[in-house]
Amino acid sequence: MTGTFTNLLFVELAVTVVAAAMLIWRSFMDMKEDDHLILDEAEAHLDREQAVIRQKVNKLTKYLHVVGVVWSVLAVVIAGLFVVQGLALI
């Protein structure tokens, strides 16, 4: 294995760990999100709290999409490099 291939594997591992941590964090935030109907002004603070939670989950989801694209591109590059190195040995 070349240094480039090994370095890309380490970067891929780091991106995978970050993605897993973000997914776990999003699942914790989703547990706090409730589906309920606010009927009176006394419960209006609950609606504001839920809006903040939804906003955080939506923001985190955008970052998860970016990490997913980066992870996919790295996977394709690593696979291509693996094939090229394998063909070079033939």
Image (tube, helix red, strand yellow):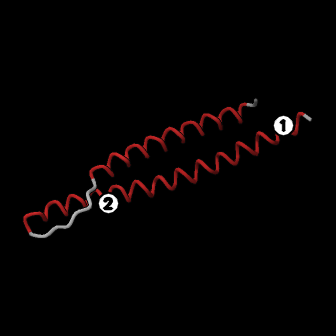
User: SS at mark 1?
Assistant: helix
Residue marked by disc 2: 55
The residue lying furthest to the right in this view is 90
Residue furthest left in the image: 42
- The secondary element bearing badge 2 is classed as helix
The residue shown at (50%, 56%) is 65
Tell me residue 39's x, y (percent).
13, 70
Q: Quadrant of residue 49?
A: bottom left
User: Which amino acid does the dot numbered 1 rest on?
Assistant: Gly
- Residue 66 pos. (x, y %): 52, 54
Pointer 1: what residue?
86
Neighbor class of circle 1 (other Cα within 10 Å; few <14, some 14-19, many 20+) is: few
39, above or below 11, in the image: below
Point out residue 62 in the picture as x, y percentages from the top left corner: 45, 58
In the picture, measured across the screen, residue 73 lies left or right of residue 59, that is: right
Q: Quadrant of the N terminus?
A: top right
> In the rendered image, which quarter is residue 54 located in?
bottom left
Which quadrant is home to the C terminus?
top right
Left or right for 89, reference 18: right
Q: Amino acid at mark 2?
A: Gln
Rate crowding at label 2 as few (under 14), some (14 to 19) or many (20 or more) other CA atoms within 10 Å. few
